[in-house]
Image (cartoon, coloured by chain):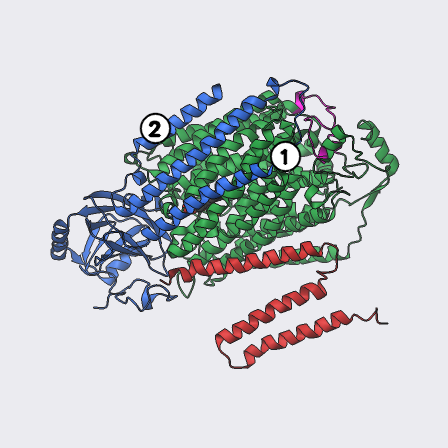
């Protein structure tokens, strides 16, 4: 039948695309994104099965019960419903949803904490804050700051602390981890590990006005020793970041990549701990916020 | 005479005044925030119930079951919405 | 602060803008001249603008919805044209932002909502055997307030600048700090005014369905569409007040410098997102539940079978409506509220798939052992089943909180909600429109042109939206006005653009069909051209003003089928005088004051605001003292009409 051909072609195209798998999200380079890619595959497969079942049933029914194929005198019966059929059509969706719920709950707990194998590491802390339409990265320990690009060491848990100097933005490096919002009145935490050196694409995914499309940044993952020499290099060569300079950077617009020594945390600390206007979050337990010098 | 005198409404009116006075006391007496809020919330709910039953005649038509079910559904949804909002905006960040 | 300091008119030296303004002005002049030339003002005023007849109000809603569909559709074509090739310069960023914002707002509030409310207006009283809704005058007012809102939003495009913060309008981007032109004021007031109308519709229809059903129509004997309508309106009444308050808070922030959603002085930007979605998720189910009702009706009619599992259908509508209030956080899983909160809302979200799945199987089982006729309304319903299954499946995928961190804000999400809204809501409304067309106007739409439209729309839909699942997974964020060649989105975006064009062609066929059939279709088609099952088909086509000469008595949820097949008597008793409400220009005048109120408020013209407000109060006072007892249609008149239409049924 014609319809069947259409379905087959349709699924061939879909599986062709998925198998091609150049898709960023399904090509993870770190444990967090890897978890998510697995969850996505599990759900895709489950859902393709569901869709095929519905399609097959529909095709058979349409084929068998169309009027043109039936006796003109045929009178369809009156059927109220059937207990056993109803148990099946309630039970099967419940089982599927229960299965996916378990996957969902486990995986969401996993990606919300430090990745497996890196739990005990002292994380490298990087503040990533957004302003219209840029990303500012402050390395409090290393005392440097970059704009629109970030270097991280491989195989090391990096704790990004996300907040915004205005609009809500969403910090996203598809190949390393899922999104998280950066907002002006609190700090969010995102753990990321890159297991392969390389350049990764990152962006703000949440619409925040005119310059949104270009609101991107670059992530470079380097082996630890190269990372350290990069830091040293910057500490020796870059200009210091002054308060006036930073105010200038905050003006709406686009900047290329920039590098400074010192961070804006000194004069404009992140909204966490005692600096948070609502004061919830990792308040007194972990108070290296604002990084007192 | 008895049928003409709206005893239920007068009682309801007095009762709702009483509830208002209790609620007002929160302002005049020095009490803890939790205590004050509890009093306000409890009196507010009773007050709404009194208004609904006594003055808006919720229980007097034949489809009172429908009215009560919908009201209760609305209240439950409202409470769950508030709890959910607290989870999403405050409790969820306290780890 | 002075108004002129706070809000600027965005600089738009765009030839396209001027062209559209000219087009709008010319069209308006043409309409006015046309109506005057054909001396139709009296007809228009007496029969339509002042009407309180639910059928005419329904039709006016549907006409407005179609107009808005074309407005929003034009926006859609512009957006896909802009993104068809990388680094395109057809629209600049600001313009693109205004276009997708207007598109979303128009499609959700002024197209989809109007369409379902229009459909309920036309069908509900007929299907329960009533003469009108419970409060006909209020119903007219609902329509005119909706229309006022729609016109205000469309005006923004010409005067002052359109809103540009997305239909979700997140603060602080939409607040006074970051959005300094009047666009978002328009958003606030247009939605506020039409929202009042929607809320009144909700109350009106609950009262209608609870109080005005034909004798014998117990709750569990209501046709399934009536159940859908009842639950939808209950949901409207519970959900819309949240939007009202959120919009009010936004208005206060923007126009009176309060700090509900700002970044300073204790404002909380999360609060807007939370309130918006507390309303927003029930809203998407407010759209889909009536659509489910339409599909149930159509699938049963064209399979010549009763609806399978009526009780479980009712139960699943109830379950969906309850659950839909408990899932809103899935729209911002990424806000940082942690694993526990997200787990809870992830589970509630996916639970909705259970009642939805039950409904899908029930539709399949309704066709089982049936006698399926492939008329156009049925084609849309059949296409709906697999397409909606895909949309629902991707919904479940999005509902897995962890995975959503990767889908959120991407074109994957955009593909999901178009995948549920287009085959779900839009197909249902088109199918319903074609299905009820003979009831509305007394002639049928051409089937052949209808099928061309159907295939264009369905294939166009698939081509336009399926590619987005892939570009989404490939890292394409939504709402980007352009992208570079290097991203690799180009091929799929071009396919998507072609699909959009096919969709547009399909909609042109749909409208062409109306003109074609108006000229060529035979009249005198009888009351029941589709061999349908519910009460509305027991009266004439088109329906006389009073709906039924004699109020029907009902035995089951398929009253008319019982009458046709099982010889139940529907119309007991004899024709009597019928009491009907009077037409009135009050509603349109009242809404006119609201228009002025909204418009002046948007621009801070306080004198105008006060005058318009006095007008509103004046209208209310007038209405309180107005004596309007309606009128009677006399027995003889009814008998004459019935005879002319082919004898009393
Ligand atoms: C099985 C049922 C469904 C599930 C599990 C589901 C799940 C979801 C989830 C989790 C999101 C948020 C994704 C994100 O922002 O990252 C979403 C978005 C959305 N859904 Fe669904 N959905 C379902 C059915 C529907 C239906 C029936 C409609 C409408 C008729 C709908 C309309 C929408 C809309 C409009 C959005 C996006 C709004 C926006 O951000 O602009 N969904 N859905
Ligand atoms: Cu939702």
Nearer to me, C288 or C543: C288
Residue C380, percent from left and from top: 56, 29
Nearer to me, A213 or A127: A127
Chain ID for red: B
Element under disc 1: loop
Is the stretch drawn in magenta largely helix, strand or loop? loop
Residue C494, percent from left and from top: 38, 29
Chain ID for green: C
Q: Is residue A54 left or right of residue C597?
A: left
Residue C527 is one of the magenta-drawn residues: yes
Residue C562 is one of the magenta-drawn residues: no
Chain A representation colour:
blue
Visible residue check, residue A258: yes
Q: Is residue C231 left or right of residue C410?
A: right
Residue bearing the label numbered 2: A16
Residue bearing the label numbered 1: C307
Residue C566, percent from left and from top: 76, 30
Q: What residue is at 74 percent from the left and 72 percent from the top?
A: B10
Stretch of the chain drawn in magenta: C518-543
């Amino acid at each position: 039948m014609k319809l069947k051909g259409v379905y087959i072609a349709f699924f061939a195209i879909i599986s062709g695309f998925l198998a091609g798998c150049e898709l960023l999200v399904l090509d993870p380079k770190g444990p967090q994104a890897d978890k998510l890619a697995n969850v996505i595959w599990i759900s895709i497969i489950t859902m393709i099965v569901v869709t095929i079942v519905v399609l097959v049933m529909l095709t058979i029914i349409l084929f068998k019960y169309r009027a043109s194929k039936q006796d003109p005198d045929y009178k369809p019966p009156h059927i109220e419903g059937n207990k056993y059929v109803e148990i099946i059509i309630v039970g099967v969706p419940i089982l599927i949803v229960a299965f996916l719920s378990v996957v969902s709950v486990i995986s969401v707990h996993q990606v919300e904490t430090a990745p497996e194998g890196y739990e005990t590491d002292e994380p490298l802390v990087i503040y990533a804050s957004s302003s219209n339409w840029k990303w500012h990265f402050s390395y409090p320990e290393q005392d440097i700051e970059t704009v629109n690009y970030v270097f991280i060491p491989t195989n090391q848990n990096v704790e990004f602390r996300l907040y915004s100097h205005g609009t809500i933005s969403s910090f996203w490096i598809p190949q390393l981890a899922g999104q998280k919002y950066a907002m002006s009145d609190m700090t969010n935490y995102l753990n990321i590990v890159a297991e392969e050196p390389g350049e990764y694409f990152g962006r703000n995914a949440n619409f925040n006005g005119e310059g949104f499309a270009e609101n991107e940044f670059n992530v470079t993952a380097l082996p630890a020793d190269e990372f350290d020499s990069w830091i040293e290099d910057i500490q020796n060569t870059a200009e210091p970041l002054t308060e006036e300079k930073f105010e200038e950077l905050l003006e709406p617009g686009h900047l290329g990549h920039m590098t400074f020594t010192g961070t804006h945390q000194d004069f404009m600390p992140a909204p966490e701990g005692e600096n948070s206007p609502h004061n919830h979050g990792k308040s007194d337990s972990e108070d290296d916020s604002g990084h007192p010098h | 005479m008895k049928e003409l005198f709206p005893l239920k409404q007068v009682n309801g009116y007095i009762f709702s005044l009483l509830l208002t006075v209790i609620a007002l006391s929160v302002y005049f007496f020095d009490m803890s925030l939790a205590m004050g809020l509890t009093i306000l919330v409890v009196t507010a709910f009773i007050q709404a119930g009194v208004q609904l039953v006594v003055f808006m005649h919720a229980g007097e038509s034949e489809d009172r079951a429908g009215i009560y079910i919908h009201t209760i559904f609305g209240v439950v949804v409202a409470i769950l919405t508030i709890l959910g909002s607290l989870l999403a905006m405050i409790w969820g960040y306290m780890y | 602060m002075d108004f002129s300091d706070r809000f600027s008119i965005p600089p738009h030296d765009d030839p396209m803008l001027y062209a559209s303004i000219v087009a709008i002005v010319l069209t308006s002049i043409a309409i006015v001249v046309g109506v005057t030339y054909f001396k139709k003002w009296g007809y228009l005023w007496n029969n339509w603008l002042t009407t309180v007849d639910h059928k005419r109000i329904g039709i006016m809603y549907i006409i407005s919805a179609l107009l808005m569909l074309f407005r929003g559709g034009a926006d859609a074509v512009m957006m896909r044209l802009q993104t068809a090739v990388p680094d395109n310069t057809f629209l600049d960023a600001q313009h693109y932002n205004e276009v997708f914002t207007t598109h979303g707002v128009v499609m959700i509030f002024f197209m989809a909502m109007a369409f379902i409310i229009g459909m309920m207006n036309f069908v509900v009283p007929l299907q329960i055997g009533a003469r009108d809704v419970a409060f006909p005058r209020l119903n007219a007012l609902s329509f005119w307030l909706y229309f006022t809102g729609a016109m205000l939003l469309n005006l923004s495009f010409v005067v002052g600048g359109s809103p540009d913060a997305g239909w979700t309008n997140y603060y602080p981007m939409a607040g006074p700090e970051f959005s300094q032109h009047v666009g978002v004021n328009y958003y606030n007031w247009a939605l506020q005014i039409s929202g009042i109308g929607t809320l009144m519709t909700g109350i009106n229809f609950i009262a209608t369905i609870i109080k005005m059903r034909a004798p014998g129509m117990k709750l569990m004997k209501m046709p399934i569409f009536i159940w859908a309508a009842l639950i939808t309106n209950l949901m409207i009444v519970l959900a819309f007040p949240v939007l009202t308050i959120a919009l009010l808070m936004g208005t206060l922030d923007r126009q009176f410098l309060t700090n509900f959603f700002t970044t300073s002085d204790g404002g909380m930007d999360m609060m807007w997102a939370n309130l918006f979605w507390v309303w927003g998720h029930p809203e998407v189910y407010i759209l889909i539940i009536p659509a489910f009702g339409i599909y149930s009706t159509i699938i049963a009619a064209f399979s010549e079978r009763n609806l399978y599992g009526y009780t479980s259908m009712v139960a699943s509508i109830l379950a969906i409506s309850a659950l839909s209030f408990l899932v809103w956080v899935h729209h911002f899983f990424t806000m940082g509220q942690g694993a526990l909160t997200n787990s809870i809302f992830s589970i509630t979200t996916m639970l909705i798939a259970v009642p939805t799945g039950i409904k899908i199987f029930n539709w399949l089982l309704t066709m089982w052992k049936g006698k399926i006729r492939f008329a156009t309304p049925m084609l849309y319903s059949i296409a709906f089943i697999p397409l909606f299954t895909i949309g629902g499946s991707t919904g479940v995928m999005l509902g897995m909180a962890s995975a959503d961190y990767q889908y959120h804000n991407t074109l994957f999400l955009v593909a999901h909600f178009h995948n549920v809204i287009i085959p779900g809501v839009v197909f249902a409304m088109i199918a319903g429109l074609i299905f009820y067309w003979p009831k509305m106007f007394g002639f049928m739409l051409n089937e052949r042109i209808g099928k061309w439209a159907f295939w264009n729309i369905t294939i166009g839909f698939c081509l336009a939206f399926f590619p987005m699942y892939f570009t989404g997974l490939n890292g394409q964020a939504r709402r980007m006005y352009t992208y570079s060649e290097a991203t690799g989105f180009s091929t799929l975006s071009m396919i998507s653009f072609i699909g959009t064009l096919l969709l547009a062609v399909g909609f042109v066929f749909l409208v062409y069909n109306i003109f074609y059939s108006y000229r060529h279709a035979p009249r005198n088609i009888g009351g029941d051209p589709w061999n349908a099952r519910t009460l509305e088909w027991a009266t004439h086509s088109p329906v006389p003003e009073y709906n039924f000469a004699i109020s029907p008595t009902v035995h089951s949820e398929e009253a008319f089928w019982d009458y046709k097949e099982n010889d139940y008597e529907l119309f007991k008793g004899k024709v009597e005088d019928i009491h009907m409400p009077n037409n009135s220009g009050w509603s349109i005048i009242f809404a006119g004051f609201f228009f002025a109120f909204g418009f002046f408020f948007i621009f801070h013209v306080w004198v105008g605001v006060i005058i318009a407000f006095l007008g509103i109060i004046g209208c209310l006072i007038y209405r309180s003292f107005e004596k309007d007892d309606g009128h009677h249609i006399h027995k003889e008149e009814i008998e004459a009409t019935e005879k002319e239409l082919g004898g009393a049924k």
